[in-house]
Image (cartoon, helix red, strand yellow):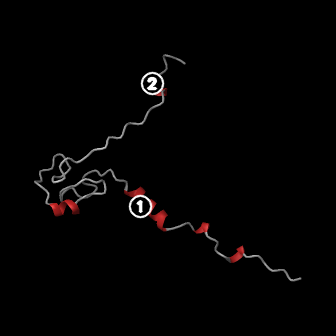
Amino acid sequence: MDVDAPESLAPESPAPVVLRSQPNKGRCFVEKCTSKKIPLAKQMINKCKCEFVFCDLHKNADDHKCSFDYERSGKELLEKNNPKLNDKPRGGRSFTRISDD
């Protein structure tokens, strides 16, 4: 093994995933948000699929840089609800002919 090998050739380990938590669910999760407290009913309505609570200004996924993958979730839902057509026999030429003897 070469000691002077460049670091770029060394196998890279993936970056550790840091799971954030929202300490106060009564306030918007966006750091520089000027909103005051979020009422309890709005906390249930404005909860995003990324499991954080946001104010009315930041509740859309584009407004708070949501980490939830909507595209992958949609594909999985479609695959679950729509089975492939090739898995099931469709009749037609799958039947065998009876020969005339």
Give residue 90's quadrant in the image: bottom right
Q: Which residue is mark 2?
A: 7
Looking at the rendered structure, the kind of residue marked 2 is Glu
**Left or right for 44, reference 85:** left
Image coordinates of residue 62 in percent, x first then y, are 28, 55
Give residue 92's quadrant in the image: bottom right
Residue at the image point whose x is 30% and y is 52% from the top: 66
Q: Quick one: label 2 or label 1, which is nearer the N terminus?
A: 2
**Left or right for 101, reference 83:** right
Q: Which residue is mark 1?
A: 74
Residue at the image point whose x is 22% and y is 48% from the top: 22
The CA span between labels 2 and 1 is: 39 Å
Residue at the image point whose x is 30% and y is 53% from the top: 50
Image coordinates of residue 6 in percent, x first then y, are 47, 22
Quadrant for the C terminus, please. bottom right
Image coordinates of residue 33 in percent, x first then y, are 15, 50
Residue at the image point whose x is 17% and y is 49% from the top: 24
Dots 2 and 1: beta carbons under 8 Å? Answer: no
Image coordinates of residue 48 in percent, x first then y, are 27, 57
